[in-house]
Image: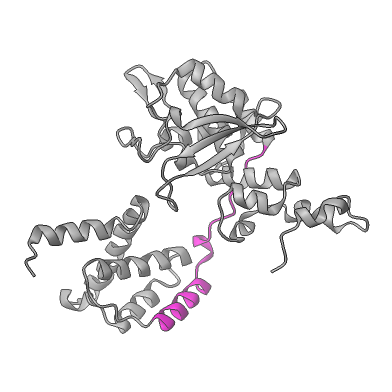
Amino acid sequence: INITDSNIDRIIMVLSHSHAQSTRETYGSSLLVFHVFCDTRAIPEEQRCPASSVLILAFIAACSGLYSGKSLENYFYAVRAWHLLHGQPWYADSDQCTLAMAGGRQLVPITSKRPKHTPFTIDILVAIHSTLDLSSPLHTAVYACLTTSFFTIAHVGEFTVPSLHRFDPQRHIKVSDWRYDADRHGFHVTIFHLPRTKTSLLGEDVYWAAQSGLSDPDAALSNHLSVNQPPPNAALFSWKHHAGLHPLMRSEFLKCLQSSSEKLGLGSLKAHGLCIGGTLEYLLRRVPFENVKMMGRWSSDAFVLYLWKHALVMAPFLQDKPVLELFMRYTLPPPL
């Protein structure tokens, strides 16, 4: 076959794009851990790829007890992806590796286990509102992004950009990507089209409805658009910097969030707490489980593992005479 080096490079480039950018970055650092492991044991290059099943098991065993279960999985799948990317056979026994990683998860040190993320609440949103200057372009964009992320149950990374010069209109949401709509009963909803997500190359829609009080995402969005006036082709939460219009970076968002958290004495609030908090808020409002699952775009019931206050969510269903008896069949998850 008349295949040139440039053809091979093209094949590798296309295969590498089978993983999201964030996954490629994680795998890159994970692969470094594997090479450090091999270097300390003087494993020759030719024995690293293709690697024997024993070498892979030894790598997992060496990392067990030092890293979290998630890190172990990243290390394993990074080495596997490296083999597949370069067309090398994968000799690792899948059953043994699965057992090894299961054992590794049991040996995870307490220090490697992350505490549960504190969920955001309406009260926390309102408290943060009090620490911000909503005439400030940056603070206005941050609060609009904050409330939209909470009420759409979306990840902050879906409404921000990773760095100043990495805004991509094909991947990141623009001003022109949101719209109003209403159902036949006149209930209004605001829809945001995410051009591309980690699970969908064609993008996905997320949405919220206007709320009452200072946490209202509709008022926050309107204020942001009035203060910053981003054009249709700009990032949705762009803000007026003295050097020009800047897309809202994730790091800027988190910095403002941390500043507000410190002023309020709330400790360290994590971005993922927004997704958890939004989910919890809707469940406490008795929104059906399946509806919340659909809003959060979960393909499984794994989201319940992240929830706090399970008892409060389930309280109406546990009473001697359930207060939601008439709606029980619509609210509870369907039987398996």
Q: Provide residue 245's location: percent of width, then percent of height.
A: 36, 21
Q: Is residue 306 left or right of residue 3?
A: right
Q: Tell me the residue at 44%/17% (across/down).
A: 229
Magenta highlight on residue 109: yes
Q: Is residue 132 visible?
A: no
Q: Nearer the viewer, residue 172 or 64?
A: 172
Question: Residue at the spot x=68%, y=35% of the render?
Answer: 122
| Residue 16 in sight here | yes
Location of the C terminus by quadrant is: bottom right
Quadrant in the picture for residue 4: bottom left
The colour style of the image is one colour
Going by the picture, which residue comes out furthest to the right?
321
Q: Position of residue 74 (x, y in %)?
A: 39, 64
> Residue farthest to the front?
184
Figure quadrant of the N terminus: bottom left
Residue 277 on image: x %, y %? 63, 44
Quadrant of residue 243 in the image? top left
Image spot of residue 99 (x, y percent): 47, 80
Residue at x 66% of width, y 25% of height? 214
Residue 69, compared with residue 235, is above or below; it is: below
Q: How many marks?
A: 0
Foreground pick, 272 / 212: 212
Magenta stretch: includes residue 63: no
Position of residue 330 in the picture relative to residue 62 (left or right): right
- In front: 38, or 8? 8
- Say above or below: 135 vs 208: above
Give the residues in magenta: 94-121
Q: Quadrant of residue 41?
A: bottom left
